[in-house]
Amino acid sequence: MLLISCPHCGERAQVEFTYERTLDSVVTLAMPPEDAMRALYERANPRGLDDELWRHSYGCRQWLLIRRNRTTHAIESVKAR
Amino acid sequence: MAADPPEPDDARHREREGAVSLNFTFDGVAMRARPGDTLAAALLRNGVRVVGRSFKYHRPRGVMSAGVEEPNALVTVGTGGRTEPNTRATDVFVYEGLVARSQNRWPSLAFDAGAVLGLAAPVFAAGFYYKTFFGPPKRWMFYERFIRRAAGMGNAPVEADPDPSEHRAAFCEMLVVGSGPAGLKAAEAAARAGHRVLLVEQDSELGGSLLFDGGDRGCIASARDAVLAAGGRVLTRTTASGLWDHGFVTLAEHIVEPGQAGPLSQRLWHVRARRIVLATGAMERPLTFADNDRPGIMLSRSVRTYVGRFGVVPGKRAVIATSNDDAYATATALADAGCEVVAILDSRTRAVIAETAHCPVFFDAVPTGTTGRNSLASVTATVAGKPHRFDADLLAMSGGFTPVVHLHSQGSGKLDWSAAIQAFVPGATDQALVAVGGAAGEIDAVAPATPILGTPKTSFIDFQNDVTAADIDLAYAEGYRSVEHLKRYTTLGMGTDQGKTSNMAALARLAGAAGVDIPTAGLTRFRPPYTPLSLGALAGPDGGGHAAPSRRLALHDRHMALAPLWQPLGLWHRPRAYPRAGETLHDAAMREARAVRTTAGIVDVSTLAKFAVSGPDAAALLEIVCATGVAKLAVGRGRYTFMLREDGMVMDDGTVWRTGETTYLLTSSTGGAERMEAHLSYAHRVLAPDLRVSVVMQQEQFAGIALAGPLARDVLEGLTGSPPPAHMGLANAAIAGVPVVVLAASYSGERAFEVYAAGDVAGPVWDALHDAVTARGGCAYGLEALEFLRIEKGHIVVGGEADGRMTAHDLRLEKMLRKAGGYIGASALERPALASPDRLQLVGLASRGDGIPEGAMLVASVGAKVEGHVTSAGPRVLEDGGIALALLRGGRARLGETLVASSPTRGKYVTVTVVEPVFHDPKGARYRD
């Protein structure tokens, strides 16, 4: 279970958070349909670092941008959104 | 190598010298043990050699080890709900009244009918199940008859465990796993540096090898005192069972022994450790030779444990077989305890150790076989190429030591190969973790495993799962080259011991067959838990009625007064119907639904998701989330709306109401409440962070009562004293002195109003409505009647008709889509496949008489291709016949077709006609103004 340092609440266990999605998968409102479908269905899911949207669901309920290593689970940074 | 004399104040020593004062039974036979004995020690003390029968061949098996790695001596302890099967006799400490039973034997341990399977051993070779299943079905039908009886381990109890388990969290600067010399040293050093240390030991006593090999035991007390003085904690009978990311470790603590009664049985710790020290030591490996599984053949260091710690000498004439120096200490310990050591068989050409014990030592010597009926009688060996035979009732073997790297590996640590000790040692890791002592590979050098076996067919590698060297050879010959495949094909390492004693021997055998070195052969990943964990410990206090919270309606007591049938809906419990004396559920629901169609009824709709959306950009946010028009809504008005997922499918539906110039109320489905909350938050915080808007979830703040029926208007006007709002209008009012918001929306197909009041004061509102409705011949209605009414009206349900694969077009909602777009999911609707004419589309079904089975397949005739399915079905409320909503391929163009709703599992086949999905008042004349 990951240990996530919430910028609002401090170090908390992963159970308090909800992984929402990788930043690559965000479909913006202005995105053309082809790009939207690519974001939804054609992501590469590479090894290594990933920017991810998390939510501190059982804490401050804020959205966080977490840079996490998909292979080692090391967390490089946690930023408030 | 004599042990240091024990200190006079050593409590453990006093116990060892103490009387056999504990009573226990094994297979019904009364026996006595000394306090501090493990069950294995106590059984050996009582002369028990055969403790169980093996998994496949039912061969007699005895105690092999003195630790959690024990593959053979599995017993069932305890009675009733406290029964714990597959308990290692080496991992349970005897308590007064312990009841232990042997397993996997019939009719008795001494005479086992299943042992004839041993004679049929070739049949059960590697891949037996695979081959049988691929063979003719008859063959399996034949085998199954006796395999069901013979295979397997102990039986799980059917009664509930009367003693609870609990969960606890802890934090520490340093977690030290294992309290042998290395662990004690690490714990003491960290504690003296002021760190909060958590020291855990799976044994009942600290000390590890100090408990049997002598040495200075003063460090035990000194380390314990230092840890406690620095605010740390020492846990015995506690196993670090799993190591997860970022220093998270789960510990399983035995509060009482397996099968023992206590206020608590186990405690599962969730520990977050800044640093972790693995001082888990090393496990001795057995040697592989023919008939190496007879009772009386034990691991060398375990023999020393029984002699040195428990004062039990498990034989009178012993042979030592070793590939390293450590076993020489066993010879000395046995000789000191009065056991005759017949020979030391050393597979090396010379010992590294300077001086040997007072017994014959043979070099280049390996055991090749054994004899004996139910226990060991003699050992045959090859010494420098020549056969020898030794009469012995005890064989202490040592194939070297394997560092216990399980936790390191669980925590994604790499493993490096050490040729000197012929074992894997901890390598690089991302965790703040360090291994020390035996776990780090600080172990005597060892000779590589020898290929001389006698016969490989009875040379056991995995004792627990009866996997022999011949099985591994066969699997390799049949093409199972990868260690992962080998494991699955032979079931190697898949017992409750997870291959603790067998992995290395198996890898050596596989590597030998493949002609590669062991690291090339590979290793399977270690996974938690390290030792078996009971489900009760995992559940902790969260079992039974506490598995999930139960959410009660604000009006719960009002419903209770009407004695409803309850229906769980997610975590909520809602009234399904209010049956009167003699009524079935269906009768009650039909009466309630008819009341709504003819007079009036009230239903609790409190669980609907409700969001207060306010701020200058409230409409803008709603237009992102809702696929329908919102901005043009006048103050005091509302409308139906639905939301799409990003892929264009309908996610949820509800209503949106403009309560003020910049304030809106959004409702959506009960089941989707949390999802919708996250969705709204996502739309705001991620997609449109600049919007000046606030979204507050108000699901529980307000109780909601829907009042529906031809007399609803009349009822409401009577209670509020003012004319109710027009359809899709909104008004503030008071009922029974309680302020309420009235939303004129209809779900039932009748004139209807949703009345919302703050949850804590809603009781009088319900009472007033209920009195007024019953006075006019109506009643309260539940979910069942609500379902009948909405099906008849053709209203979709999220999770039913809107099952996550449906577009607005499929559900006939496309006319409501906002032309300008700009909402979530809009761009996805342009995908060509979504315009395909053979998509599943919402239709109605009508049958002449029979009820239509919900969930049935739609087919042209029984046995034909499936073209859709029934999503919801019910009766017509005021007329005869069954109706249903369904999803049918190209359904919109198939009105009038006759199909069969086929439900083979229920034996129901109903002829249906495809119709428009509205069965009642298609124009809405009954509620529109």
Image (cartoon, rainbow, N blue to C red):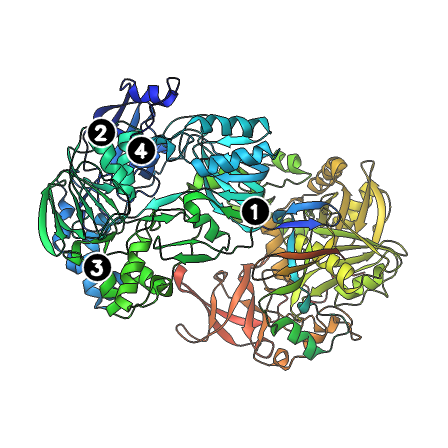
Choose the circle earlier in sequence order: 1 or 4.
Answer: 4
How many angstroms separate mark 1 from mark 4 (CA)?
34 Å
Indicate the secondary structure of the residue bearing disc 2: helix
Amino acid type, residue under disc 3 in the picture:
Pro
Which chain is mark 2 on?
B
How many angstroms separate mark 2 from mark 3 (CA)?
33 Å
Choose the circle earlier in sequence order: 1 or 3.
Answer: 1
Residue located beneath label 3 in the image: B451
Can you say whether B160 is above or below B218 in the image? below
Amino acid type, residue under disc 2 in the picture:
Asp
Choose the circle earlier in sequence order: 4 or 2.
Answer: 4
How many angstroms separate mark 2 from mark 1 (CA)?
45 Å
Residue located beneath label 2 in the image: B336
**Which of these two is toward me, B359 or B59?**
B359
Residue located beneath label 1 in the image: B247
Point out which mark residue B926 bears.
Answer: none
Q: Does mark 1 fall on the same chain as mark 2?
A: yes
Amino acid type, residue under disc 1 in the picture:
Gly
Nearest to viewer (mark 1 / mark 3): 3
Indicate the secondary structure of the residue bearing disc 1: helix
Choose the circle earlier in sequence order: 4 or 3.
Answer: 4
Q: Within the image, what quadrant is residue B761 found in?
A: top right
